[in-house]
Image (cartoon, helix red, strand yellow):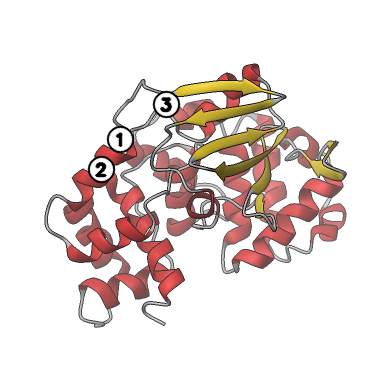
Amino acid sequence: MCYNKSNMKVIESNNNIILKEQRDFEPAHIFDCGQCFRFNANPDGSYTGTAFGRTVRVSKEAGEIILHNTSPEDFWNIWKDYLDLDCDYGRLKMQLTSGGDPIMAEAVKYGEGIRILRQDLWETMISFIISASNNIPRIKKIIELLCANFGDAHEYEGKTYYSFPSPQRIALLTLEDLSVIRAGFRDKYILNCAKKVCSGEIDLDHIRSLDTIQAKKSLMSIYGIGNKVSDCILLFGLSRSDSFPIDVWIKRVMEYCYFGNEPQTIKTIADFADERFGELGGIAQQYLFFYAREKRIGT
């Protein structure tokens, strides 16, 4: 769910796009909340990353959001949607906090600049297959190796960046070829997924057309995609904000914040989240994840 807004003020300047009066946007909140793995922080607080074959640096300076190294065409065709700039997160936050939940109110205040990126479905599927039983630094390293070895290279600010390899490119590989990315047992999941996408057995457009329940069922039929990974793909690759991914970390956080630190089943937590947050469950999860990780809550 997203409330639309149309008051975006966009200025083009020297191959940069400047967004004026852009509220609810903090690069660190967006790129460090666990939703994507290809943006990295720079010493000046900006973030550089690659999506849809383009590399951009995102900074916030004097209250203005600047997208460095992008054309107006790429902004309107790629980055506006990717950064979910049409969505009024102010209204979403009001809805999440209107019920008097002090935990959510604090989490929203702490991560006020979070936006849910609208990522490429194929890249999201492979990225979260890699994320299973893994930690963020290692996930990022594996994805970096995957792109460096099998993506297309381009230069920006003296560094080489790579596009995410297509299913067609990966389907041509062997498990021995893929071993260079050091993904371990996940290699076979990646290769199987690519081959099935290329054969048409996995139809990405069909998955996009399904409702959340059916899309989840379809995703979970894919080798290597379980309950948590499918929920992440639904939220980050299909923009299904009613999906509430639950991993070990979120389970611990929910138990700590909402169940008096008493152990709960995944189903109990999922049912609670559905009742409490409804169609905004995925957005609520990101606020909770960022807040709890930064504050070390539940550890």
Which residue occupies the extreme left position in the image?
99
Q: Amino acid at mark 2?
A: Glu
Q: CA distance from mark 1 to mark 2?
A: 7 Å
Identify the element where label 3 is drawn: helix
Closer to the camera, 229 or 220?
Answer: 229
Q: Is residue 69 left or right of residue 80?
A: right
Q: Which residue is mark 3?
A: 209
Name the residue type under label 1: Met
* Residue that badge 2 annotates: 279
Residue positioned most to the top:
73
Image quarter (top left, top right, bottom left or bottom right) of the C terminus: bottom left
**Is 262 situated above or below 68?**
below
Query: Is 280 left, or right, of 189 in this rendering?
Result: left
Residue located beneath label 1 in the image: 1
Circle nearer the N terminus (1, 3): 1
User: In this view of the protein, which residue sits in the foreground, 33 or 261?
Assistant: 33
Q: Kindly tell me whether residue 173 is visible in this rendering.
A: no
Tell me the distance, in whole angstroms, between the alpha carbons under discs 2 and 3.
18 Å
| Residue 66 drawn at (x, y percent) | 59, 35
Mark nearer the N terminus (1 vs 2):
1
- Compared with 289, 61 (above or below) is above
